[in-house]
Amino acid sequence: ETGVTQTPRHLVMGMTNKKSLKCEQHLGHNAMYWYKQSAKKPLELMFVYSLEERVENNSVPSRFSPECPNSSHLFLHLHTLQPEDSALYLCASSQVDHSGNTIYFGEGSWLTVV
Amino acid sequence: QKEVEQNSGPLSVPEGAIASLNCTYSDRGSQSFFWYRQYSGKSPELIMSIYSNGDKEDGRFTAQLNKASQYVSLLIRDSQPSDSATYLCAVNQFYFGTGTSLTVIP
């Protein structure tokens, strides 16, 4: 079983749909992240849940809403998305402590908005 | 100004050669630096992390950090076709470059 598991791996949704991406980490980490990866663009940090605090990138539209019910699970709720939101969405986790903060990524969820 | 800049490539090297990948960053206060490898259609995987000025070696990989010049590099010795991938530079784990595409020619 991989350290960070994402489901679904592929998702096609219409602009009026509501869907969610799910992530689970089995590494005992205390921080989880959502990143967006689009072609020819740098990885974009969307949300961070670390030590029970949420940090968000202010440029992320409100049609994306995260939920972190506990330290092992992370969701990204999607509603009324636009075609330009089609991308690879990566979940990641890390252990934030004095020794560093190495991030481990899941396999990603490929999202296509039609 | 971009937070992290990388030459997008593509960079092509023959098998057995040294591949040199470079990255510059804008935040002088950055403390941690990472290199990830990403194969096409896959998620990034960590290769190296470096926190102090100088060189850090791990097998065929060497990361070099120069905080005064705000650059970090990755050297891959004895390059193999399996090293063909996109290499992402990350600073403080939050800021990523666009990646450099490397092709190792057999």
Image: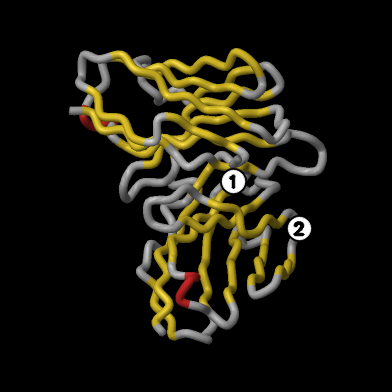
Dot placed on the residue nearer the N-terminal end, 1 or 2: 1
> Farthest right residue?
A98
Helix, strand or loop status at disc 2: loop
Question: Would residue B96 appear left or right of A17 to someone viewing this image?
Answer: right
Helix, strand or loop status at disc 1: loop
Question: Would residue B56 appear left or right of B35 to someone viewing this image?
Answer: right
Please give the residue where the numbered disc 2 appears in the rendered image. Answer: B52
Total marks in image: 2
Residue A45 in sight here: no
The image shows residue B78, relative to residue A27, as above or below, that is below
Residue at image position (31%, 13%) is A18
Please provide percent x and percent y for residue A57: 48, 26
Please provide percent x and percent y for residue B88: 50, 55
Residue at image position (44%, 39%) is A108
> Farthest left residue?
A114
Kind of residue sitting beneath label 2: Ser
Residue at image position (64%, 71%) is B61
Please name whichever residue, A61 or A72, is drawn nearer the observer in this view of the structure.
Answer: A72
Determine the image quadrant of residue A44: top left
Q: On the rendered image, what quadrant is the N terminus of chain A found in?
A: top right
Between label 1 and label 2, give the one nearer the viewer: 2
Please give the residue where the numbered disc 1 appears in the rendered image. Answer: B27
Residue A37 in sight here: yes
Kind of residue sitting beneath label 1: Asp
Please provide percent x and percent y for residue A85: 29, 30
Determine the image quadrant of residue A69: top right
Badge 2, how many Cα within 10 Å: few under 14, some, many 20+?
Answer: some
Colour pattern = secondary structure
Which chain's residue wears label 1?
A: B
